[in-house]
Amino acid sequence: MGENTGQPKIVAIKRIVQETPRIKSFYLDCVMNALPGQFAMAWLPGIDEKPFTLTAAGKEGAITVQEKGKFTKKLFELREGSKVGIRGPYGNGFDIKGVKHACIVAGGCGVAPILLLAEQLSKQGIELAVINGAKTAKECLFRERLGKAAGNLYITTDDGSLGERGFATDVLQKLLEKEKFDCVYG
Ligand SMILES: Cc1cc2nc3c(=O)[nH]c(=O)nc-3n(C[C@H](O)[C@H](O)[C@H](O)COP(=O)(O)OP(=O)(O)OC[C@H]3O[C@@H](n4cnc5c(N)ncnc54)[C@H](O)[C@@H]3O)c2cc1C
């Protein structure tokens, strides 16, 4: 956010995007000056406060959340216009200095932390391969945005319903045999 006081700021949810059957993005009405990989603390009074990686930064912030337990079930009950406490950004973000040829490997909801990284590397003209793993085609997160950012997007699913059947790490192993990356982010 503009100034990071350490106190949660109460902000409105501007819009909610259903990304996969169990993952939603919550776009927040606040300025969020964050580096790729940084996270914010989301607070629901009387429930809890939990960390979530930022999937939008700049004029608005966003968090992308998988429904799991107590906190995320409550968050999923909120609607556009509902309020949530937000503080941050926190964490160090990814180091991209000196990187010219990169690979990103992530799976499931773990794709959320690498989205802004992929978009930043692409903006800087860095040659990029992304391996995006999911259980099924329906659960594949940020396929379109990663497709635009990556020179090569590899998709794996556990059941083979999209891309290659298997794990993201299987594709990584094959890629490492034929390509040399300055950095592999996960
Ligand atoms: C730096 C950081 C970044 C993160 N970024 C993201 C992100 O971008 N997106 C995201 O979705 N999450 C992210 N997380 C995880 C997030 O903070 C929460 O931990 C997560 O959403 C689960 O919170 P919850 O309260 O809904 O679930 P919890 O209530 O904490 O439950 C989590 C799991 O444990 C099980 N469980 C709960 N209590 C018990 C029990 N007593 N016995 C057995 N099992 C139990 C639940 O059924 C559930 O499967 C991040 C975490 C960190 C540390």
Image: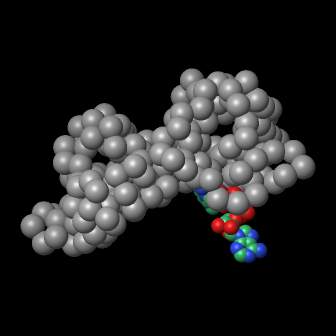
Q: Work out which residue is located at the far right of the displayed protein and give it.
A: 46
Q: Nearer the viewer, residue 166 or 121?
A: 166
Residue under the point 73% across and 36% down = 78
State which quarter of the image contains the N terminus: top right
Q: Is residue 154 visible?
A: yes
Q: Nearer the viewer, residue 143 or 178?
A: 143
Report the front residue among 85 and 46. 46
Where is residue 146 drawn, in percent x and y?
32, 42
Q: Is residue 176 left or right of residue 124?
A: left
* Relative image position of residue 27 (x, y in whole percent): 60, 31
Using the rendered view, name the quadrant where residue 173 is placed.
Answer: bottom left
Q: Image quarter for residue 162?
A: bottom left
**Residue at the spot 59% in from the left edge and 48% down from the top edge:** 65
User: Seen in the image, is 30 located left or right of residue 9?
Assistant: left
Where residue 38 sits in the image (x, y, percent)? 56, 48
Judged from the image, the quadrant occupied by ligand 1 is: bottom right
Considering only vertical position in the picture, is 19 above or below 110?
A: above
162 and 141: which is toward the camera: 162
Q: Quadrant of the C terminus?
A: bottom left
Which residue is painted at 54% across and 28% down in the image?
58
Q: Position of residue 133 (x, y in %)?
A: 35, 59
Q: Give the residue displayed 78% in from the left and 39% down from the top.
A: 85
